[in-house]
Image (spheres, rainbow, N blue to C red):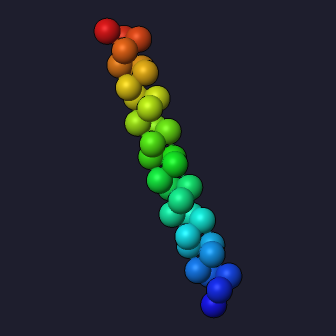
Amino acid sequence: SFQNNWIENTESKWGRLNNKFRQGILTVEERILR
């Protein structure tokens, strides 16, 4: 159904954002620790 597709698309978008966000935090932590 349309709603299921919309939910899946939204979850995948948020998943990508979360991955970018976590990677950004990891790089910032590495810079602080060094």
Total marks placed: 0
Counting from the top left corner in percent of width and height, residue 7 is at 63, 72
Q: Quadrant of the C terminus?
A: top left
Question: With respect to residue 10, does 24 lie above or below?
Answer: above
Give the residue drawn at x 42%, y 20%.
29
Q: Quadrant of the N terminus?
A: bottom right
Counting from the top left corner in percent of width and height, residue 11 is at 57, 64
The answer to which quarter of the image holds residue 24 is top left
Residue at the limit of the structure toward the bottom, as seen here: 1
Counting from the top left corner in percent of width and height, residue 9 is at 55, 70
- Residue 23 located left or right of residue 2: left
- Residue 1 located left or right of residue 27: right
The answer to which quarter of the image holds residue 33 is top left
Question: With respect to residue 21, does 5 lie above or below?
Answer: below
Residue at the limit of the structure toward the right, as seen here: 3
Counting from the top left corner in percent of width and height, residue 30 is at 35, 19
Give the residue drawn at x 44%, y 46%.
19
Give the residue drawn at x 43%, y 21%.
28
Question: With respect to residue 33, does 16 lie above or below?
Answer: below
Give the residue drawn at x 41%, y 11%.
32
